[in-house]
Amino acid sequence: MVKLCKDSGAGLVICQWGFDDEANHLLMHEDLPAVRWVGGVEIELLAMATGARIVPRFSELTSEKLGFAGSVKEVRRLEFIYLLDLRKMSFTVDMFEGRWRGDPS
């Protein structure tokens, strides 16, 4: 799983159903941050904003299905993840406890 993600060129992995702590550790060991247990609606919004395709299995992951964000910033104390400079939309998306907001950029 980690090799498939790394080989695709992904810089961030986002998963709806989650994966175990060992997989999360292995992803971080490969400098590949991951977000797990993200809601389906949020993943769809993220896919639209970044130009990504949602894949149901790691084996279907290819570089052509990856989205783009100019930068990803994490604020741990607030459990926020900011995705900036998105490919398809002109706003910043932030996640807080599974809710998404758009801020004009």
Image (tube, helix red, strand yellow):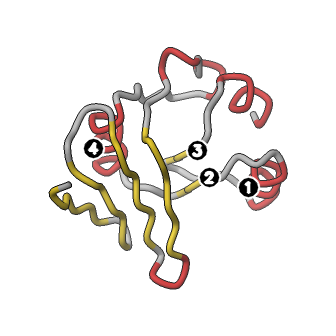
Q: Are marks 3 and 1 in contact (CB under 8 Å)?
A: no
> Are there few (<14), some (14-19), or many (20+) residues within 10 Å of tag 2?
some
| Residue occupied by mark 3 | 12
Disc 3, SS: loop
Mark 3 or 1: in front is: 3
Q: Whole-Å distance between the Cαs marked 4 and 1?
A: 23 Å
- Secondary structure, mark 2, is strand
Looking at the picture, which amino acid does disc 4 mark? Answer: Leu
Using the image as rendered, state which of residue 89 and residue 29 is in the foreground: 89
At x 57% / y 18%, what residue is drawn?
A: 63
The image's mark for residue 24 is: 1
In the rendered structure, find residue 45 and report the number of the disc placed on it: 4
Looking at marks 4 and 1 on the same chain, the residue that comes earlier in the sequence is marked by 1
Q: Residue placed farthest to the left in the image?
A: 104
At horizontal 52% and vertical 50% (from top left) the residue drawn is 17
- Lower position in the chain sequence, tag 2 or tag 4: 2
* Residue type beneath disc 3: Leu
Residue type, mark 2 in image: Ala
When asked about the image quadrant of residue 93, the answer is: bottom left
Label 2 with label 1: CB-CB less than 8 Å? yes
> What label sits on residue 34 in the rendered view?
2
Vertical side of 12 occupied by 88: above or below:
above
Real-space CA distance between mark 3 and mark 4, rounded to the nearest whole angstrom: 16 Å
Residue 60 sits in which quadrant?
top right
24 with respect to 56 (left or right)? right
